[in-house]
Image (tube, rainbow, N blue to C red):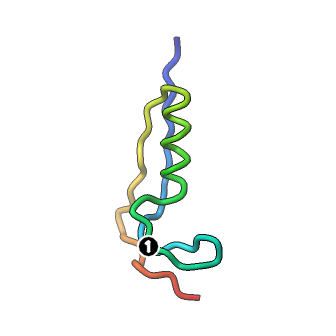
Amino acid sequence: MSRTLIVYYSRRGENYVGGVIKKLQQGNTEGVAGKIAALTGADSFRIETTKAYPAAIRR
């Protein structure tokens, strides 16, 4: 039986959600990756940047 690994990058902090900027403790992709891992029994691994992204998104 093969093992499955879900590898993801997810930005926490300020993100657009429904057209509004919100501070997220968990990024959107992290939430989806967690649900997939729970449904499939797969392991998950979060990719972290070596250089931090800015905390705020300004457009």
Helix, strand or loop under label 1? strand
Quarter of the rendering containing residue 43: top left
Q: Is residue 32 or residue 4 the one in the foreground?
A: 32
Q: Is residue 26 or residue 7 the one in the foreground?
A: 26
Q: Residue 38 in the image: x percent, y percent?
A: 49, 33
**Looking at the picture, does residue 11 appear above or below residue 56?**
above
Residue drawn 52% across the image and 17% down it: 2
Quadrant of the drawing holding the C terminus: bottom right
**Looking at the picture, does residue 26 appear above or below residue 7?**
below
Residue drawn 52% across the image and 72% down it: 15
Instruction: Please give the count of numbered marks on the rendered protein.
Output: 1
Among all residues in the image, which is located at the extreme right? 19
Q: Residue 50 in the image: x percent, y percent?
A: 35, 63
Q: Residue 13 in the image: x percent, y percent?
A: 42, 70
Q: Is residue 25 or residue 51 the one in the foreground?
A: 25
Residue drawn 55% across the image and 47% down it: 32
Among all residues in the image, which is located at the extreme top? 1
Q: Check disc 1 and give the amino acid type.
A: Lys
Q: How crowded is mark 1: few (under 14 residues within 10 Å), some or many (20 or more)?
A: some
Quarter of the rendering containing residue 45: top left
Q: Residue 33 in the image: x percent, y percent?
A: 52, 44
User: Residue under circle 1?
Assistant: 23
Q: Is residue 55 left or right of residue 30?
A: left
Residue drawn 48% across the image and 58% down it: 10
